[in-house]
Image (cartoon, rainbow, N blue to C red):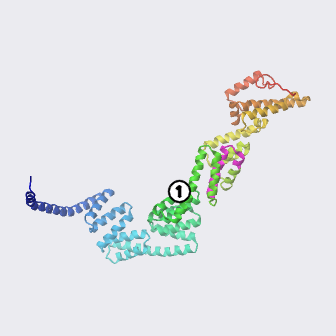
């Protein structure tokens, strides 16, 4: 067994060698460190010159990590950030350069320009003045003087814009802010003020653009997200409103305005989605009820009332509730007369209600607004055929039934009218002839409307009993030939042979 003393002796023997190795490794790191920073700087410069910005940035990161007090490493990294459009990241590096080397004029001039773009006017002016006092080159002096003059002008414009805004002259304030933002492109405060001008002027699209920019330019800008959500909500865009208010709550889950607004938007969004699912399932009456609930949930935003009524119009037309559909569709078109979807749905309701001229008018109006919509073209052609047909012979009217009547109702109406108008009931020759013609029409109506194929053709505006309407229709042309050969006789054999008992 090896004794403890023996192990201790061996360790003491090796300690000098271990210390020497550690010393050598330490010296190697020191030497490698300086050499490594220089190597990263050289490689970074080459990559930057070649336009390989991401790779250059990695090397300058390594150089800064290797020597945090190397002002050129910070400056080079700031240069890459600027080339990549990451000005926010460049600014701390430029400030560190100036801290390490206060007389670095180029770094101070670049920082001043960034501060000016961010709307930090006092700090920018201070830097421009220091550049002018630091023995700059002619080019730097000209740039600093020009930018300082511009910064002074922007300061004056900012004061004027605030005065105009406070005086409620929003048009003037917005114009002044336009000029400010042309120079101070990253100034969140100016964009927020201009967005407020646009809101008060009713130009919501422009307000949205400015608020979106402001939400990115300023960290944790919960107010911008809240305003964006509110604008989308009042425009009737519940999904975008929900997206923006969620962004607000990501930044601050306890934000009172955003949380309260979120609950309302989420409730409304859920109801609208549910109503649309009901329409997809063809549960139209349930969808109408759900959209009535939407209007109760948000009675004050006109866009949601219009949206609800537009979809109710569609559901009612699809469920063949013509009278209700016409009423609701009409309400929407009073406020939005160029709503193509509602024009199409109302046209369908007019067809159901047998108001063919009105249907044609709505389809024509829709076609002017949406020329390539096949549904409109087909609907217009059908409405025109039905209008033409209604001016000739309408089998539904002959039997006194609705277009939605079932076969049982049609046969019942036919039998009642056949009994009433049978020629045997009339003695006077004139009346008898009139009854014969009437009876033939009743019989034709029954034949067409109880034959699924013939009824479908008639519903599409083609009269199976009219040779002009049937040109090119081989099946019905053959049917007409049979009628002509056999003679159409509602009093003889076939489906019209029945016996009357008047006891």
On whether residue 460 falls in the magenta region, the answer is no
Residue 487 in picture, x, y percent from top left: 78, 23
- Quarter of the image for residue 5 reads bottom left
On whether residue 313 falls in the magenta region, the answer is yes
Left or right: where 457 falls relative to 491:
left
Looking at this view, is 493 or 101 the one in front?
Answer: 493
Looking at this view, is 436 or 143 the one in front?
Answer: 436
Judged from the image, the secondary structure of the residue bearing numbered disc 1 is: helix
The residue range painted magenta reads 302-326
Left or right: where 339 falls relative to 173:
right
Residue 385 in picture, x, y percent from top left: 71, 38
Q: Can residue 342 be seen by looking at this rendering? A: no
Looking at this view, is 500 or 71 the one in front?
Answer: 500
Residue drawn at point x = 74 percent, y = 42 percent? 354
Q: Please tell me whether the stretch drawn in magenta is mainly helix, strand or loop.
A: helix
Residue 184 in picture, x, y percent from top left: 45, 68
Q: Is residue 186 above or below residue 287?
A: below
Q: What residue is disc 1 on?
A: 240
């Amino acid at each position: 067994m090896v004794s403890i003393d023996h192990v201790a002796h061996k360790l003491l023997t090796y300690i000098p060698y271990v210390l020497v190795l550690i010393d050598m490794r330490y010296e190697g790191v020191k030497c490698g460190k300086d050499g490594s920073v220089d190597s990263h700087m050289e490689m970074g410069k080459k990559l930057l010159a070649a336009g390989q910005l991401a790779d250059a940035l990695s090397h300058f990161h390594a150089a800064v990590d290797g020597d945090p007090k190397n002002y050129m490493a910070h400056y080079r990294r700031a240069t890459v950030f600027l080339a990549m459009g990451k000005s926010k990241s460049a600014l701390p590096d430029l400030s560190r350069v100036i801290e390490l080397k206060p007389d670095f004029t180029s770094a101070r001039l670049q920082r001043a320009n960034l501060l000016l773009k961010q709307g930090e006017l006092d700090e920018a002016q201070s830097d421009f003045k220091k550049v002018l006092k630091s023995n700059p080159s002619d080019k730097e002096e000209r740039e600093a003087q020009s930018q300082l003059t511009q910064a002074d002008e922007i300061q004056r414009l900012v004061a004027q814009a605030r005065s105009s805004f406070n005086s409620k002259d929003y048009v003037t304030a917005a114009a002044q802010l336009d000029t400010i933002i042309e120079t101070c492109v990253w100034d969140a405060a100016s964009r927020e003020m201009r967005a407020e001008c646009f809101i008060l002027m009713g130009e919501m699209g422009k307000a949205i653009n400015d608020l979106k920019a402001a939400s990115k330019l300023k960290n944790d800008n919960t107010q911008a997200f809240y305003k964006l959500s509110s604008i989308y909500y009042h425009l009737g865009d519940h999904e975008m409103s929900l997206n923006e208010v969620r962004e607000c709550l990501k930044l601050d889950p306890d934000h009172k305005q955003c949380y309260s607004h979120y609950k309302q938007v989420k409730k409304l969004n859920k109801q609208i989605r549910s109503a649309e699912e009901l329409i997809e399932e063809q549960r139209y009456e349930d969808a109408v009820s759900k959209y009535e609930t939407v209007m109760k949930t948000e009675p004050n935003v006109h866009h949601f009332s219009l949206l609800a009524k537009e979809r109710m119009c569609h559901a009612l037309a699809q469920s063949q509730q013509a009278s209700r559909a016409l009423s609701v569709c009409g309400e929407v078109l009073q406020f939005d007369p160029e709503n193509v979807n509602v024009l199409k749905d109302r046209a369908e309701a007019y067809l159901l209600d047998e108001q063919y001229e009105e249907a044609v008018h709505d389809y024509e109006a829709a076609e002017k607004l949406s020329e390539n919509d096949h549904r409109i073209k087909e609907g217009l052609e059908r409405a025109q055929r039905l209008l033409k047909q209604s001016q000739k012979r309408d089998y539904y009217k002959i039997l006194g039934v609705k277009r939605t009547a079932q076969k049982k109702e049609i046969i019942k109406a036919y039998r009642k009218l056949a009994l009433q108008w049978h020629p045997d009931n009339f003695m006077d020759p004139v009346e008898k002839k009139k009854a014969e013609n009437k009876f033939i029409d009743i019989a034709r109506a029954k034949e067409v409307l109880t034959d699924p194929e013939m009824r479908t053709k008639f519903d599409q505006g083609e009269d199976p009993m009219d040779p002009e309407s049937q040109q090119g229709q081989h099946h019905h042309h053959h049917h007409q030939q049979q009628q002509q050969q056999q003679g159409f006789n509602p009093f003889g054999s076939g489906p019209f042979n029945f016996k009357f008992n008047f006891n």
